[in-house]
Amino acid sequence: MVNEMAEPLIFHFDVDGDNFTSAGQASVQVKKNLRQLGIDPETIRRVSIAMYEGEINMVIHAKGGEADVIVSDESIEIILKDTGPGIANIEQAMQEGFSTAPDNIRSLGFGAGMGLPNMKRYTDYMHIDSVVGEGTTITMRVNF
Amino acid sequence: MTVNELSAKQGFKPVAMPDGEREINGVYIGDLLSWVMGRAKADDAWITIMTNINVVAVASLADTACIILAEGVNPDASVIETANAKGINILSSEMPAYETAKAVGI
């Protein structure tokens, strides 16, 4: 819990879509920032895993994007925005095990169809706004 | 049991040990990284055969006590370097995952 915060803190990141090995840099930085704010470890764990899954998705499917993390008195909000191919069937994408990731991604241990379900699992609120051919915006919140 | 103690007791080779006094409170075995992030608990020893750079990020974000590489697999130098920089412990075990988990014995 962050006490008596005057106004929300906003962290902004550009997620590089070309470099899969550096994917996760934004999440690791957020983890560090939240730790400095004195936020409890389990909340940090939930936020950083949810954000990492989103970051990986942006790298796999959308050639990168933008991430904003907003820390307020009540919650930590994560907004992930890309201009990738969009999600045709969100209900299907939310099912554990459903994946459209290519084989080279699977060989790295990703693409198990657990990304979006994990994002939902670790957050108190999750909304997917997606238009095929235009992009996807995911909003997640972890409450204090 | 700390990661240092586990390494000494079972002869698991310390590949990267920036935070050896970290306590281990459980074990998780898995190679699918999102599955690990969904199921492993903080302070688990995570046993895997994956050695790519992403395992360091997963261990960091999931807050596991250490990674134990089973079957004697070895990571690249760049992975070891990143693990040391990010405070992630990596041990290496010659045994398969099941025997490795039994040896941890938690």
Image (cartoon, coloured by chain):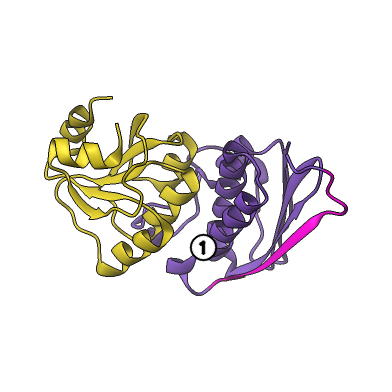
Q: Position of residue A60 (x, y in %)?
A: 51, 62
Above/below status of B67 relative to B1: below
Q: Chain B colour?
A: yellow
Farthest residue, direction bottom = A18
Residue for point 33% across, 44% down: B66
Was residue A11 drawn as part of the magenta stretch in this picture?
yes
Could you tell me which quadrant the C terminus of chain B lies in? top left
Residue pointed to by mark 1: A60
Farthest residue, direction right = A6
Q: Which residues, given as a range, are shown in magenta?
A: A4-17
Above/below status of A102 relative to A18: above
Question: Tag 1, which secondary structure?
Answer: helix
Give the side of residue A12 with respect to residue A96, left or right. Answer: right
Could you tell me which quadrant the N terminus of chain B lies in? top left
Kindly indicate the quadrant of the structure image that contains residue A141: top right
Chain identifier matching the purple colour in the rendered picture = A
Q: Is residue A116 visible?
A: no
Residue for point 66% across, 59% down: A86
Was residue A89 drawn as part of the magenta stretch in this picture?
no
Kindly indicate the quadrant of the structure image that contains residue B85: bottom left
Above/below status of A31 relative to A104: above
Dot 1 surroundings within 10 Å: few (below 14), some, or many (20 or more)?
many
